[in-house]
Structure formats: structure tokens, C-alpha cells
Image: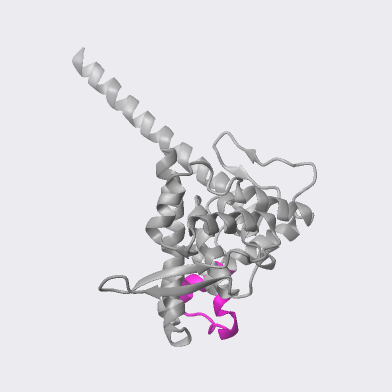
Amino acid sequence: MLEKLDTLGAWLLIVLMAGSFLYFVIAHQLGFSYAKKLFGTRRIKEQRQEIPLEGNLFAACYVRTNQPRIFDQHIHHELSAAFLYRWYSEGKVKLVQLKPALEIVNYLSIQKDAVIRDPEENSLYQKFCDAAGENGLLDVDEVYDWSYNRPGDLYGYKPEDIGKKWFEDRGLIEPGNPKDKLTNLGVRIRPLTPAGAAKARGLVELQNFLQAQAEDKPCDPVDATWIDDLLCYGQLFGIADKLAEKWKTNLTEEKTIVVKLCRDLAQAFFDGNNVATD
């Protein structure tokens, strides 16, 4: 009797393992077909350094957070870092170095009366203005504490929804499918038009170019006039520090410092908010 039970248990285990394997194979294939429907191929090898999506970071956020098996998700702190570096390149924030004790401490000084016409971007900018306090200096610990003491959504809205609206306003999402759908396997179908998919593909091609630069793989030389824009997207992809190291002969020491500081400040903003809402 015990031998029969052992045999039955072994067969049940084999069936369970086979079923799990089959499930993941099917999920993988469905994910592949949906990604193929969107991009034409699951792995895009082309490298282009042109700035995609008219430079709209919210649209880039939508692509990054909503395309299965293409990009990582949960990039809100990386989006904040990208905006911080963009504001620096536009002169809205500046590097300030103080020496309160034995070593130099880096801050970003934020221009509190800067005009930002996009309401969603301005909402994020104003939060960093508030976090900077009366002296207008963004310090990592101060930003963390400010964000911790004001729990809630990081932006007050979902940046990927703002990005989706960018596609909708340009007719780049298929009509008749206003809502994103989920299959029973949890694979997302994103109804972009062929033109919308081509624009989304541009973001993948830019990431491929920047990733090749960061890893010192074969690629075209970087256009030096675009370095600030490329570093902005490098922040979005989480590799700006590697790019700054690669391009250090083309960068001032200040920009190298700012690249890391933007990421540290954005991470503090994100971490403080998350800890407060856990």
C-alpha cells in the first residue's frame, strides 16, 4: 500500500512539474506574440541616438511601464531623475557646493519662480521646490524627510496615464480599444497603431544605443551636441552614471557630479514616500 502511495505521489509531482512548464511556455509564447505585434520583433537590435517621442518623458514612461518583456517596470524615481537633469540642463537648477564641515557637500539650488508650462511637469517641479525649503537647496536627507512627511502618491497622478494621453492625442492608439486589456495569463495588450508602435520602437532603439555606449560595445560615436538630452534619457534608463563615466572627456566635472546627485535626490524622494506609505 505504501509503495502504491509513493508511486502515486511521484506521478503527481511529475504531472505538476509538466503542467507548470507548459504554463510558462504558453505564457512566454503569448508574451512574444504580443510584443511582436507591437514592435515587429521581440528584440530590437537597431541603435539610434535620436531623441524619441518629441522628448516627452511622460510618453517614454508610458512605453517603459506598459510594454511586456521589453522594459522594466516601476521607474518613477528614474523619471524624477530624468526631469531633474533636464531642469539642470535648462538652467532651472544649479549645482551648489558648500563646505559646512571637513568635506564638500553637493546641493542642487532650484529656481522657485521658473516657468514650466506643462502642468504635470510643473506639479513635480513644485514638489521639489517645496522639498528645498526656504534656502532653495535640495539635500538628499532633506528631500527624504520632506517626502516621508507627506505620504501619498509620488506625483498626485500616474505619469504613465499622462504618457498614454500623449499617444491618444496624436491618434496613435487604436480606436475602439480605449482601455488596455489583460489576458488570463496577465500579459498586457497595448493597442497602439502601427505609427504609434514605430514611435515606441524609437525609445527601444535609443536605449540600445545608450546601453551599448555604457557597456563599451560597438556603436556609432555620440553626437556631442546631444549629450545633455542623452544623459536625461540615461537617467530614465538608470545608466546615466555609466554614461557620464564613458563620456567624461566630453563632460565638465560639474556635470558628472550633477548626474549622480539627480539620481540620489530622486531616489530619496521615492524612498521617503514609499516608506511613509508602507
- Report the residue at 45% width, 72% height from top: 258
Look at 47% across and 68% down and name the residue there. 108
The part of the image, by quadrant, that contains residue 88 is: bottom right
- Membership of 222 in magenta stretch: yes
**Residue 150: where, in percent of width, then height?**
48, 44
Residue 187's spot in the image, x, y percent?
57, 42
Is residue 45 in view from this perspective?
A: no
Residue 42 location, quadrant? bottom right
Above or below for 99 versus 188? below
Figure check: 253 above or below 13: below
Is 197 placed left or right of 19 in the picture? right
* 239 up-or-down from 158: above or below: below
**Whether residue 223 is situated above or below residue 257 in the rendered picture:** below
| Total marks placed | 0
Q: Is residue 186 left or right of residue 278?
A: right
Report the residue at 70% width, 48% height from top.
191
Along the horizontal axis of the image, is 28 left or right of 49? left
Q: Nearer the viewer, residue 62 or 84?
A: 84
Q: Is residue 202 inside the magenta stretch?
A: no
State the scheme by which the image is colored.
Answer: one colour
Instruction: Decide which of 51, 13 is in the foreground and name it.
Output: 51
The residue at the far front in this view is 134
The boundaries of the magenta stretch are 206-228
Q: Position of residue 121 (x, y in %)?
A: 63, 58
Q: What secondary structure is the stretch in magenta mostly built from?
A: helix
Q: Position of residue 275 (x, y in %)?
A: 40, 43
Most distant residue in the left direction: 2
The residue at the point 59 percent across, 80 percent down is: 226
Q: Residue furthest top?
A: 1
